[in-house]
Image (tube, rainbow, N blue to C red):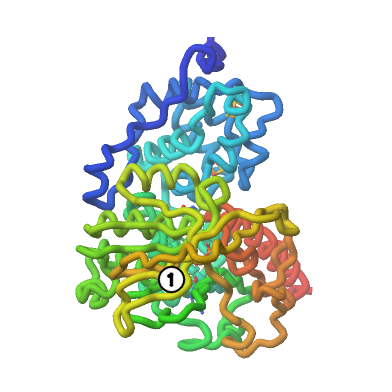
Amino acid sequence: MATQKMLKFVTLGKEMPEKRDPSARAQDFHEIYREYADQKAAEQAGRCSQCGVPYCQSHCPLHNNIPDWLKLTAEGRLQEAYEISQATNTFPEICGRICPQDRLCEGNCVIEQSGHGTVTIGAVEKYITDTAWEEGWVKPIRPHAERPESVGIIGAGPGGLAAADVLRRQGVQVTVYDRYDRAGGLLTYGIPGFKLEKPVVMQRIDQLAQGGVQFVANCNVGDDITFDAIRGQHDAVLIATGVYKSRDIEAPGVGARGVVKALDYLTASNRHGFGDDVPEYDSGELNALGKRVVVIGGGDTAMDCVRTAIRQGALSVKCLYRRDRANMPGSQREVQNAEEEGVEFVWLSAPKGFTGGIEVDGVMVQKMRLGAPDATGRQTPEIIEGADYVEPADLVIQALGFEPEALPTLWGVPELKVTRWGTIKADFRTHETSLPGVYAAGDIVRGASLVVWAIRDGREAADAILGYLNQTGAVAAE
Ligand code: FAD
Ligand code: SF4
Ligand code: SF4
């Protein structure tokens, strides 16, 4: 009986796909988890208790129908599992790899809450869609009928691409503009290959291109083409440009050679991985080989930098963070991966300045302690006087987060309303901005967030754009 395949959590423990040995994975940029064997995926999916009220689903930003695709996987009905999974998620194999599941679906699984270890939802989601690609079940988009309306999407990250997919399926003519030479946004140039191998992203972009989505690469809106020109060429526009202005440290010596920004560093590494000519990498400016590396920050970008430096052959890699392990924003799973690979975390430490003059040779470190909680309840770091020291460093990577660029100024559209943080003001359901027919999605609205939220925004914005096109088309036809 089919149900006998479920509820196995009582007798079967949680088992993630095999993790590669740290010494081997530190030598390359391949993903660190292997694929589940078919039998293992079915068994692990069968641990689900098929909750009547599935908290996993309500805590997934896409409200994926997790219990159903777990049950189908346990029964070996993988093509049906794939159909259900892709109905709510544009890029399930990407989310399965890089969603912080411990904070979303898996962190809220009732089996996890009852101490049995979560159902490995992300790994099963990845397994289902990787299988779908291998079996040829993922097909280019073929709309039932073409529509005359066109939509311009600025930004080819997950938000823009998710919207492109929904609109193209309805036959809308879609053009995606991006300032980079490759599409994918941070999936391509931010997130390292050991979390998300690049062919996984490129195959999705090829699928969209084969389905009729037009990509205009190397096109910086506001520079190569005006925003008004894009509005003039399309019936509606979606802004999905992400957030790219890095928060810099304000301390003496920050301008020294060898003090670099996280995204410059990660982009150079990813470009090198693509086989591009990267002079800053070859010259050593953005390459950790043989260096004592200090990364400043405690978020996921910092984790990606430390683990990239290990793979580039750094002499040593230290991560400075001003709070402690329990209070860092980055995922604990990533900290553990980094420690296994040889990264040293220096908690309760903040940079006071940089030594060495023209070329950095050290970070002046201030020791901190956690004081009284602030308005948000988070303990404020306080300086411990007289405990400063110098941490030797040849490469210092600043990973303190990102802010939006000033789009209304850069694009000469003061009517485009932004919040006091500079993110675009958009309706939280329709994603329409202060300009009629102009929508916004992803990090440029939320501030630095997650891929899964960008996908959700992109899909919702596309639905709203379809409604707008139907309405304006009807008005035009009257
Ligand atoms: P982006 O992915 O930033 O894409 C925006 C695109 O717009 C870019 O391609 C850019 O070139 C283009 N663009 C910008 N301005 C213009 C312009 N003027 N003209 C033309 N094109 C323009 N999230 C996770 O869920 N899991 C993770 O593990 C994870 N790791 C991360 C690691 C790093 C290092 C970073 C920086 C972020 C990470 N994130 C992660 C966050 C995630 O990548 C973002 O939340 C997500 O990519 C946002 O999607 P988006 O489409 O809004 O923007
Ligand atoms: Fe979990 Fe992310 Fe998949 Fe949702 S999309 S089920 S949060 S891994
Ligand atoms: Fe299955 Fe856990 Fe979701 Fe319940 S919460 S349906 S056990 S995955």
Q: Nearer the viewer, residue 84 or 122?
A: 122
Query: Residue 428, relative to residue 139: is it above or below?
Result: below
What residue appears at the point 31 percent right and 63 percent down from the top-left corner? 293
Q: Looking at the picture, how far across and down is residue 239, in whole percent? A: 59, 72
What residue appears at the point 26 percent right and 68 percent down from the top-left corner? 287
Q: Quadrant of residue 151?
A: bottom right
What residue sits right under mark 1 in the picture?
Answer: 215
Q: Nearer the viewer, residue 358 or 243?
A: 358
Query: Residue 110, relative to residue 233: is it above or below?
Result: above
Q: Looking at the picture, how far across and down is residue 318, in whole percent? A: 36, 57
Q: Residues within 10 Å of mark 1 (few under 14, many from 20)?
A: some
Q: Name the quadrant of the C terminus.
A: bottom right
**Circle 1: element type:** strand
Which amino acid type is shown beneath numbered disc 1? Phe
What residue appears at the point 66 percent right and 24 percent down from the top-left corner? 51
Query: Residue 265, relative to residue 135: is it above or below?
Result: below
Does the image show residue 66?
yes
Does the image show residue 151?
no
Q: Is residue 60 left or right of residue 216?
A: right
Q: How many marks?
A: 1
Q: Nearer the viewer, residue 399 or 269?
A: 399
Q: Looking at the picture, how far across and down is residue 359, in whole percent? A: 29, 80
> In the current view of this chain or complex, which residue is farthest to the front?
386
Q: Is residue 442 left or right of residue 15?
A: right
Query: Residue 6, relative to residue 305: is it above or below?
Result: above
Q: Is residue 266 left or right of residue 98?
A: left
Q: Looking at the picture, how far across and down is residue 426, in whole percent? A: 71, 68
Is the C-beta of the residue carrying label 1 under 8 Å from the nearest atom of ligand 1? no
What residue appears at the point 31 percent right and 85 percent down from the top-left corner? 358
